[in-house]
Amino acid sequence: MLPRIKLINGKTTACSKKKDPMPNYSFRIAAIFGLLSVVLGAFGAHGLKTLLIENDSIEIWKTAVDYQMWHALALLAMGYHGSTRIQFKAASACFSLGVLLFSGSLYWLALAGPRWLGPVTPIGGLLLTFGWALLLQASWKGKHQE
């Protein structure tokens, strides 16, 4: 049986408990990004160390790992918060795509990938920045504005 809520006019109505898929999405993406950042960080420090030294790209690899982990933690917090605000959903999408473009292009460049990926990195950075701006905007919205 669905829970009932009392309306202002005194009547009661059934309240459906629609589950928003957003928290699960944020948790899943956060877990994937977190897992991969630990694996890629360890792989860069051990398995790829010689190659990264040859390419003079250890710092590039570390930057990619750091940004991926920080945004995994942000997605985790957003999933825990569970807000249904459009700004949270948009920020989550910006973080997800931003990490793929920003960190992904840095990983590839660190491994001497094609240089045409260079312009992809700032696009990912802009998406990450836009995600933080959306979270800031959501913090200014009223508590009950969805």
Image: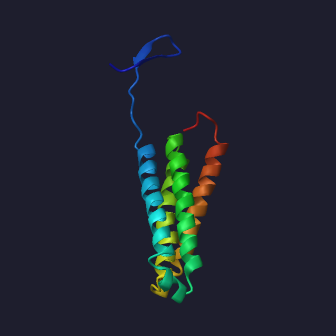
The quarter holding residue 67 reads bottom right
Q: Position of residue 77 (x, y in %)?
A: 54, 47
Number of numbered tags placed on the structure image: 0
Q: Quadrant of the C terminus?
A: top right
Q: Residue furthest top?
A: 10
Q: Nearer the viewer, residue 134 or 52?
A: 52
Q: Residue furthest bottom?
A: 54
Residue 131 visible in the shown view: yes
Q: Residue furthest front?
A: 46
Q: Position of residue 5 (x, y in %)?
A: 46, 18
Q: Image point 58% across, 71% down: which residue?
A: 63
Q: Nearer the viewer, residue 65 or 146?
A: 65
Residue 83 visible in the shown view: no
Q: Nearer the viewer, residue 88 or 25?
A: 25
Q: Position of residue 130 (x, y in %)?
A: 59, 60
Q: Quadrant of the N terminus?
A: top left
Q: Residue furthest right?
A: 140
Q: Image point 60% across, 50% down: which residue?
A: 135
Q: Image point 44% across, 59% down: which residue?
A: 35
Picture colour scheme:
rainbow
> Please, is residue 114 above or below residue 24 in the view?
below
Q: Image point 53% across, 68% down: which residue?
A: 65
Q: Position of residue 45 (x, y in %)?
A: 51, 74
